[in-house]
């Protein structure tokens, strides 16, 4: 069953998270280019669940993560403009569509922000690991990488459940 196709304007909340995401992306590129010349020729490029480096590459690979983040951000941002195509755990009707879509767009903006922040922290950790020679990061980071977006989704699913009525 197709969801009602209505236009829902971005909330201030959504705009704020998108704006902060863009600022962080710009900062990540700036930090990466600023630190690039100080990096050794080989840098850690992947960390296992225990936080130990298990992949290495040329220092030019440090550019990959910020580029990936900007592509993810743009893709998710564009997707957020079409909340009627999302899958919902509730029934979307003409009566609740505006509320449901507003909540969904906020969820997507926050998840997008969290992705940007988490990948930025990872980028900083990679650069720090390369410059210090300490090739590990806290295993807590792996847990946060999974649980922060998961908890956000749970909170928003509860909000969606309330919006259904």
Image: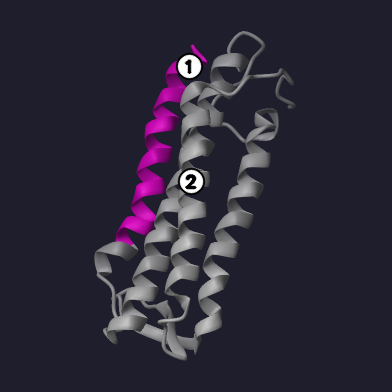
Residue 153 among magenta residues: yes
Q: Nearer the viewer, residue 99 or 123?
A: 123
In the rendered structure, which disc, 2 or 1, sits on the residue that comes first in sequence?
A: 2
Vertical position of residue 116 compared to residue 158: above or below: below
On the image, the x and y values in percent for residue 60 come to 55, 81
Mark 1, secondary structure of its residue: helix
Vertical position of residue 146 compared to residue 43: above or below: above
Mark 2, secondary structure of its residue: helix
On the image, the x and y values in percent for residue 164 come to 51, 16
Q: Nearer the viewer, residue 142 or 74?
A: 74
Residue at the image point whose x is 45% and y is 50% from the top? 24
Separation of disc 2 and disc 1 at Cα?
31 Å
Q: Is residue 118 left or right of residue 81?
A: left
Q: Nearer the viewer, residue 145 or 93?
A: 145
Q: Residue 10 falls in which quadrant of the image?
A: top right
Residue at the image point whose x is 51% and y is 29% from the top? 14
Tell me, yes or no, whether the two marked residues, 2 and 1, touch with CB atoms within 8 Å: no
Vertical position of residue 14 compared to residue 147: above or below: above
Quadrant where the image shows the N terminus: top right
Q: Residues within 10 Å of mark 2 (few under 14, many from 20)?
A: few
Q: Nearer the viewer, residue 104 or 118?
A: 118
Q: Residues within 10 Å of mark 1 (few under 14, many from 20)?
A: some
Residue at the image point whose x is 42% and y is 59% from the top? 120
**Most prominent secondary structure in the magenta stretch?**
helix
Vertical position of residue 18 compared to residue 37: above or below: above
Q: Which residue is mark 2?
A: 23
Q: Which residue is mark 1?
A: 163
Q: Which portion, as a residue range, is magenta?
A: 143-165
Q: Residue 86 falls in which quadrant of the image?
A: top right
Q: Residue 109: which disc?
A: none
Residue 154 among magenta residues: yes
């Amino acid at each position: 069953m197709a969801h009602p196709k209505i236009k829902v304007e971005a909330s201030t909340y959504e705009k704020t998270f998108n704006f902060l995401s863009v600022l962080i992306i710009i900062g990540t590129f700036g930090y990466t280019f600023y630190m690039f010349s100080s990096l050794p020729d080989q840098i850690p490029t992947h960390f296992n669940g225990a936080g130990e480096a298990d992949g290495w590459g040329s220092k030019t690979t440090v550019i990959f993560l910020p580029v990936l983040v900007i592509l993810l951000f743009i893709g998710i941002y564009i997707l957020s403009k079409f909340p009627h195509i999302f899958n919902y755990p509730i029934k979307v009707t003409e009566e609740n569509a505006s509320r449901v879509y507003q909540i969904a767009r906020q969820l997507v903006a926050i998840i997008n922000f969290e992705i940007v922040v988490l990948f930025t922290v990872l980028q900083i950790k990679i650069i720090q690991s390369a410059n210090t020679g300490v090739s590990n990061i806290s295993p807590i980071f792996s847990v946060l990488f999974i649980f922060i977006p998961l908890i956000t989704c749970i909170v928003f699913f509860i909000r969606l459940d309330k919006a259904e009525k």
